[in-house]
Structure formats: C-alpha cells, structure tokens
Amino acid sequence: MKGVWMVEAATASAWYEIVREVLKRHDVKLVTYVPDNVLRPLIEAVEADPFFQAFACTREEEAVGINTGAWMGGVRSMLLMQTSGFATLPNVLASLAVPFQIPVLMMVSERGTLGEFNIGQSLVARTMRPVLEALAIEHHTMTRLDEAEFILDRSLVQAFATMAPVCFILSPLLTGGKVFSK
C-alpha cells in the first residue's frame, strides 16, 4: 500500500519530476548547481517552481560552501553537478562536511561510462565511488525510474537524521545520459 507521501511523486513520469517532488517533500528549498546538459530538465524544473531558490555556481566547492552556510542558517539544500565536478570536492567534504556533520546533499550526473569519449570523465568516474567510500559518505547509483523515489526519500531521511552527507549518482540508464555526435 502506498502512503500519502508517495502520491505526488508516483504521478510524476520523468526522473527529474520525481526528484523535484521528493525535494519539496523534505523541504529542500535551495538548489545550487554547476550547469550540465543531463541535469538541465531538473534545473529548469526547480527554477520554474517558486518553492525553490536555484542558482548556478562557478565551482562545486563554492556550492558546497553555500549549501553548508544555508544548513547552518536552517535551510536545506542540494548541489547538482556532473562527474568531473565531483573530482574537485574531496578536500571540502573531508575537511568540512564530514567532520562537522553537515548533511551535504549531492546529485551527480554520471559521465565516463556507456560510450564516453572523454578520458578525463572516464578517469573521474572510476575514482568517484572509492572516494565516497573512503570518506564514509553514503552513495547510491540510481539506474531505474521505479526505484528513484524510494532511494531519494529514504536517503534524505537518513542524511538529516544522521547529519551526514549523501550522494546520488544518476546513471545514464536513468537519465538517458549525454548524447554524443558520431
């Protein structure tokens, strides 16, 4: 039996609609991002929704700093980025978010796999999960639309309850990934 909390997102048909509805349910009002084509539908959805305050950052570390300050001010937030942007974050996560128990929410559009042409993206894709594990940061690779709401909902509950970061890795199997010209 589905609970009332699942009704809104259950009617959503696309991954980004599910994400938007789950963020709203958990009162995540601030969305910072570094522009990315795969994340564009989600970015456009939160920018169009008056519930959210969304804006672009120049670097991922800047967004973590903004989101950390927002948390200290009582505002929940999420950072959207692509795989290569994650490569800039280990220091700020290890020196700020993890030791000070700040639930930094991260969503990463996965590059570096399934037909990737850019060797830099491939290298970062191979190191992202081991870095998250080394920092003891909960992470989930989301591949299926029918599991997206459950993974997001339960992981946000856990992140806020345990005061710990969480990272959602959006597989091209879920998002369709970046389309490359031949």
Image (tube, rainbow, N blue to C red):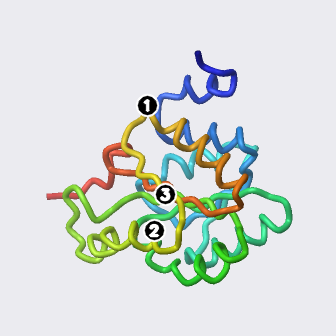
Q: Secondary structure at mark 3?
A: strand
Q: Residues within 10 Å of mark 1 (few under 14, many from 20)?
A: some
In this picture, is 143 found above or below 126? above
**Is 78 left or right of 72, judged from the image as shown?**
left
Residue 146's disc is 1
Q: In the structure shown, which secondary structural element does the residue marked by tag 1 occupy?
A: helix
Q: The disc labelled 2 sits on which kind of residue?
A: Glu
What amino acid does circle 3 point to?
Answer: His
Q: CA distance from mark 3 to mark 1?
A: 18 Å
163 sits left or right of 39 in the view: right
Q: Label 2 near label 3: C-beta < 8 Å? A: yes
Q: Earlier in the sequence, mark 1 or mark 2?
A: 2
Instruction: Say which of 15 and 128 sits in front.
Output: 128
Residue at the spot x=47%, y=60% of the render? 108
Q: Which residue is mark 2?
A: 133
Front one among 32 and 134: 134
Tag 2: Cα neighbours inside 10 Å, few (<14), some, or many (≥20)?
A: few
Q: Toward which corner of the image does residue 87 lie, by quadrant?
A: bottom left
Which quadrant is the N terminus positioned in?
Answer: top right
Q: Residues within 10 Å of mark 3 (few under 14, many from 20)?
A: some
Q: Nearer the viewer, mark 3 or mark 2?
A: 2
Q: Position of residue 139 (x, y in %)?
A: 49, 57
The numbered dot on residue 139 is 3
Residue at image coords 71%, 67% = 102
